[in-house]
Image: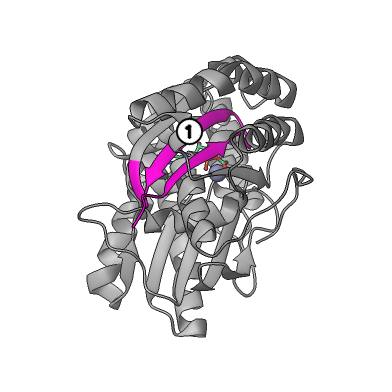
């Protein structure tokens, strides 16, 4: 049978990404990260859309070239329709529509949050695919959700954050610790050399499977402010311990909710996705949960954790098989639930 080549395009936030999959296997996976936001300590939407506009053609060209094909070989184009920043989404959406129209090939819309979870279905050696039904924990800069996944496109959010997302909490805490944006990966790095029990931060008291991270953020802030009155160099001198203690608390919050979700659903297969799934603490806790609780846990390859287009392309692949196409009247959706 013929090869299925899917081009994935992702532009929902501050990374411009394109990837080509052949029959679900990676041929190329290009991400252009926008450095400009570092100066502002967070993503500036207007600057993000401008950078997407500049990056999108070279990134797609590179993805197609690296895959060793020409654009005429493409079977279909999949793009992120939402959720995300409207100005950013418009760039990828408009480009995907035009390109599919010019090449006269099918166009496929993809939900970014579904893609973070279905990234586990990219064909990779030494990586198993989850079995349905499984639980998904999506942890990123914009989302924190526990999702029940019964089939490729049958997903139900069974718990989510009531305020900040985990990644957001990491980045805000990073700011308090005078770390550059995004603070998440840096806190993770320092945490590995610190004492997780050095300081105790407040854990939220949220019912059912929902999360809250704003209280933890405030708890860290007040603690630092109090200590700095006594010692202005407190943060500098205790950076590793502060990072380790913060990370310990976050991992505990996430694991406690997962345990509750497993108990409630009886599902012991758990897959994580989103930028924060790159975190060493959560990876370790989930790996240990296999022998400790008898769960089967799926941790994505590092390059499929933060925003990328390979995850968009794999959803495109399965939607292609299912003939879930859209026409050029499709529009981007900043708020797009599962
Ligand atoms: O999925 P993603 O790339 O973009 C969104 O859709 O939000 O996630 C980005 C988030 C940022 O908040 C970043 O700080 C966080 O993921 N992050 C991490 C780590 N790597 C990225 N947080 C904690 N530990 C990490 N190793
Ligand atoms: Zn994301």
Does residue 36 appear to the left or right of 46 in the view shown?
Answer: left
Q: Main secondary structure of the magenta part?
A: strand
What residue would you read off at disc 1? Answer: 72
Does residue 182 appear to the left or right of 54 in the view shown?
Answer: left
Residue 261 lies in the magenta-colored region: no
* Res 144 → quadrant: bottom right
Q: Which residue is painted at 31% across and 43% down in the image?
A: 195
Other residues around mark 1 within 10 Å, as few (<14) / some (14–19) / many (≥20): few
The magenta span reads: 1-26
Q: Position of residue 42 (x, y in %)?
A: 63, 26
Above or below for 244 versus 57: below
Q: Which residue is painted at 38% across and 38% down in the image?
A: 188
Q: In front: 256, or 318?
A: 318
Does residue 201 appear to the left or right of 269 in the view shown?
Answer: right
Give ligand 2's quarter of the image: top right
Does residue 317 appear to the left or right of 222 in the view shown?
Answer: left
Q: In front: 260, or 268?
A: 268
């Amino acid at each position: 049978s013929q090869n299925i080549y899917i081009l994935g395009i992702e532009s929902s936030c501050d990374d411009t990404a394109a990837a080509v999959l052949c029959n679900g296997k990676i041929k190329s996976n290009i991400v252009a990260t926008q450095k400009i936001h570092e100066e502002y300590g967070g993503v500036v939407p207007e600057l993000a859309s401008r950078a997407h506009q500049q990056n999108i053609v070279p990134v797609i060209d590179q993805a197609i070239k690296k895959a060793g094909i020409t654009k005429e070989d493409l079977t279909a184009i999949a793009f992120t329709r939402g959720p995300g920043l409207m100005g950013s989404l418009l760039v990828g959406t408009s480009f995907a529509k035009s390109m599919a129209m010019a090449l006269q090939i099918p166009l496929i819309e993809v939900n970014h949050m579904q893609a973070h979870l279905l990234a586990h279905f990219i064909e990779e050696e030494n990586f198993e695919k989850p079995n349905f039904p499984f639980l998904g924990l999506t942890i990123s800069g914009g989302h924190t959700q526990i999702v029940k996944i019964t089939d490729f496109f049958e997903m139900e959010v069974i718990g989510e954050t009531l305020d900040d997302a985990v990644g957001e909490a990491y980045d805000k805490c990073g700011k308090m610790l005078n770390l550059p944006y995004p603070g998440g990966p840096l806190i993770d790095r320092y945490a590995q050399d610190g004492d997780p029990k050095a300081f105790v931060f407040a854990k939220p008291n949220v019912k059912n499977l929902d999360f809250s991270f704003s209280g933890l953020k405030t708890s860290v802030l007040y603690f630092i402010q109090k200590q700095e009155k006594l010692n202005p160099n407190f943060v500098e001198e205790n950076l590793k311990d502060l990072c380790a203690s913060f990370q310990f608390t976050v991992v505990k919050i996430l694991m406690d909710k997962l345990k509750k979700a497993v108990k409630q659903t009886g599902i012991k297969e758990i897959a994580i996705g989103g930028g924060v799934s790159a975190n060493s603490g959560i990876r370790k806790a989930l790996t240990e949960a296999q022998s400790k609780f008898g769960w089967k846990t799926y941790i994505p390859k590092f390059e499929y954790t933060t925003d990328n287009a390979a995850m968009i392309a794999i959803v495109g692949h399965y939607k292609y098989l299912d003939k879930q196409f859209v026409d050029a009247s499709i529009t981007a959706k900043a708020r797009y639930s599962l």
